[in-house]
Amino acid sequence: MKPTGEFFKTLGKYVYAYIDDDGEILYYGKGVGDRAYHHVEDKEYDWNHAYIVARNLERFDDKTDSASFAIESFAIYLLKPRDNKVSGRYGDAFIMAKFSDFFQDFESSQHDNFKELPEWYIDNYDSFRGRIREVKITSGNIFIQSGANNAVYCSAYVPVNPENSFDVTFEVNQSGDKLDSIKVGMTAFLEAEGFSVETVNNDKKLQVKANNVESFIELFDNFWG
């Protein structure tokens, strides 16, 4: 599905890429509006291969040396030099995320259409508002998955009885050195929160056990904080 015009407006000036399932880079480009989507038609690219590399680059426009300023910021973000004590200015502009994932997060932040939500969710709505990507309600549990926070998704199957313990999973949407770096940081964060951390299923997932829903909500809040 093509993202909405409102979503594209949030990107401002951006850089995009098409990368196939084998990791081959097919195309890099820059644009505003729905420019990135045009290649689905003119080059017959798969929209699932579309990535947003950087966004809101208009923030560099008021710099007298805007080109070098942007390149410096990107290089610091990408390479993380040892002696750069702080991130490049506007380092948050560089995200390298799938358009489809980023659009889903945008959609989730716009509304909450879920009905029959449990009392603990409603009572703690401020903790979840704008941070939830997906909620599924069944007779046995409630599945919650967050949007991406620094390329990490938090998810859990919360049991009907919120006093029971349950697993909370953190999945890193990166690979290579970036994956390893984020996992080290997440492990340190979770251990500081008092949790024992396990790697499950694949090397992109870390798992901890919440004693109850209150423990989960506190962890969720701190994850975003």
Image (cartoon, rainbow, N blue to C red):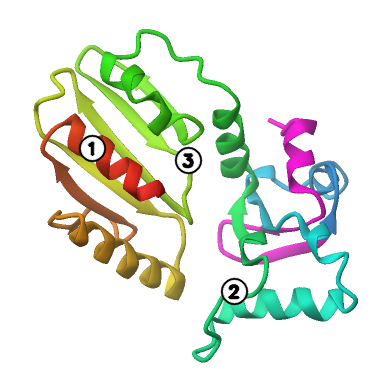
Closer to the eye: label 1 or 3: 1
Residue 204, visible in the rendered structure? yes
The residue at 60%/59% (across/down) is 95
Is-magenta flag for residue 211?
Answer: no
Where is mark 1, residue-wise?
Answer: 216
Residue occupying the point 72% across, 34% down: 3
Q: Are marks 3 and 2 in contact (CB under 8 Å)?
A: no
Left or right placement of residue 177 versus residue 38 in this view: left
Q: Amino acid at mark 1?
A: Phe
The Cα atoms of the two marked residues, 3 and 2, are separated by 21 Å
Mark nearer the N terminus (2 vs 1): 2
Label 3 Cα neighbours within 10 Å, binned few <14 / some 14-19 / many ≥20: many
Q: Residue at x 87, y 79 (%)?
A: 65
Q: Which secondary structure lies at badge 3?
A: loop
Which residue is labeled 2 in the image? 77
User: Does 165 sit left or right of 76 as displayed?
Assistant: left
- Residue extent of the magenta highlight: 1-29
